[in-house]
Amino acid sequence: EPEVTQTPSHQVTQMGQEVILRCVPISNHLYFYWYRQILGQKVEFLVSFYNNEISEKSEIFDDQFSVERPDGSNFTLKIRSTKLEDSAMYFCASSHDRGSSYEQYFGPGTRLTVT
Amino acid sequence: AQSVSQHNHHVILSEAASLELGCNYSYGGTVNLFWYVQYPGQHLQLLLKYFSGDPLVKGIKGFEAEFIKSKFSFNLRKPSVQWSDTAEYFCAVKSGAAGNKLTFGGGTRVLVKP
């Protein structure tokens, strides 16, 4: 069964550094998402991406964050200058469409630790 | 803004016991409802979903959920749990009107004792 993959599984970075989290969505999917889960808190939506542009973003997704689909397979989340509060598990997801067969498939996550 | 609440943070059961996890959402419009499960060390997987039609939805691994519109609820049930059902369970809502984002509840950790 096709899967969403994410790399790295764990990233440790110093405050102020830039990080790029990578995701490979399922190949025929058209919609891509990033969520995050701070330890002990809910899974929160960050951004959705369709047709090479952001379709929706949350208040969390400020100017420090950006997303890109640099080629036909990867979908990346960049945090320009990391803060301690960016430490979280980041999940990538993808879906095929918005109809009744809609389902978001999640990757295993990247645990980001900002020190 | 829509929100989702799961009433139980932790549930401990013995094998063969029945399981019911509560989920309530706040949103006045059309919603699509989901239950995801995360087994230890694994990624979020869809258990079941409701879009329309029969409010009693059957999912994988013997799980079912009932959408009660008047109560804004979508509770998950399984008549007889197994040790392998030990996992964290997440209820999620998507607005039917627009947008694809999922709003998640806080999750319920279920431990099934053998």
Image (tube, rainbow, N blue to C red):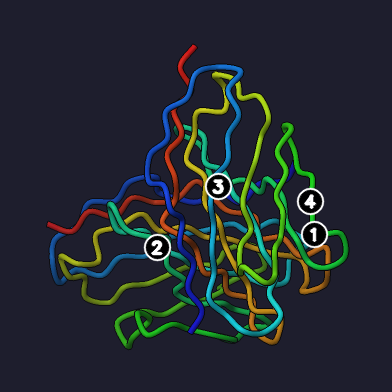
Q: CA distance from mark 1 to mark 4?
A: 6 Å
**What chain does mark 1 sit on?**
B
Q: CA distance from mark 2 to mark 1?
A: 30 Å
Mark 1 neighbour density, 10 Å: few (under 14) some (14–19) many (20 or more): some
Asked which quadrant contains residue A95, the reply is bottom right
Marks 1/4 in contact by CB < 8 Å: the verdict is yes
Tell me the mark number nearer the camera, choosing from 4 and 3: 4
Q: Nearer the viewer, residue B31 or B40?
A: B31
Give the number of the disc on residue A36: 2
**Position of A63 relative to B35 (above/below):** below
Residue drawn where x is 46% and y is 34% of the image? B110
What is the number of callouts on the image?
4
**What chain does mark 3 sit on?**
B
Asked which quadrant contains residue A1, the reply is top right
**Position of B53 relative to B80 (above/below):** below
Do the residues indicated by labels 4 and 3 lie within the same chain of the protein?
yes
Query: Could you tell me the amino acid type at mark 1?
Result: Pro
Image coordinates for residue B102, horizontal then vertical, percent: 57, 69
Tell me the mark number nearer the camera, choosing from 3 and 1: 1
Give the number of the disc on residue B44: 3
Mark 2 neighbour density, 10 Å: few (under 14) some (14–19) many (20 or more): many
Tell me the mark number nearer the camera, choosing from 4 and 2: 4
Give the number of the disc on residue B57: 4
Residue drawn where x is 88% and y is 65% of the image? B53
